[in-house]
Image: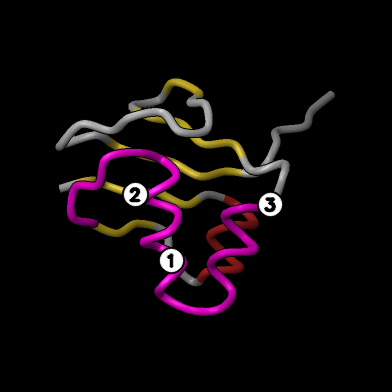
Amino acid sequence: MLTVLFFARIREQLGESRLQCAHVSSIDTLIDTLSLRGEQWSPVLRAPNVIVAINQAVARAGQLLCDGDEVAFYPPVTGG
């Protein structure tokens, strides 16, 4: 199983903060799987500025996943 977390604007747009998902092989496959949940999911998760982290480390597109990983989606962080 994977734990998938959504933060800030992404959480608000999807109406989910956390879910459990069956293990899939990669970030890309996870996004494909989550996109089946509804038409708003794909554009939100595939937006060019969305940051994906695996086990609290920023991930790259196509990165492989292991069973038990925590995957987080969040918008870019700004501050001053």
> Which residue is disc 1 drawn over?
16
Q: Is residue 26 above or below residue 54?
A: below
> Which residue is disc 2 drawn over?
4
**Could you say which is closer to the camera, residue 57 or residue 28?**
28
The residue that appears at 50% across and 23% down in the rendered structure is 58
Instruction: Looking at the image, tell me whether mark 2 or mark 1 is earlier in sequence order.
Output: 2
> What amino acid does circle 1 point to?
Glu
Residues at marks 2 and 1, CA–CA distance in whole angstroms: 10 Å
12 lies left or right of 5: right
Could you say whether the residue bearing mark 1 is in a helix, strand or loop?
loop
- Residue 22 on the magenta segment: yes
Judge the density around disc 3: few (<14), some (14-19), many (≥20) Cα neighbours within 10 Å.
few
Residues at marks 3 and 1, CA–CA distance in whole angstroms: 17 Å
**Could you say which is closer to the camera, residue 23 or residue 72?**
23
> Which residue is disc 3 drawn over?
47
Judge the density around disc 1: few (<14), some (14-19), many (≥20) Cα neighbours within 10 Å.
few
Which residue is outermost to the right? Answer: 80
59 lies left or right of 33: right
> What amino acid does circle 2 point to?
Val
* Residue range highlighted in magenta: 21-46
**Could you say which is closer to the camera, residue 31 or residue 15?**
31
Which residue is outermost to the bottom? Answer: 38
36 lies left or right of 40: left
The residue that appears at 57% across and 43% down in the rendered structure is 74
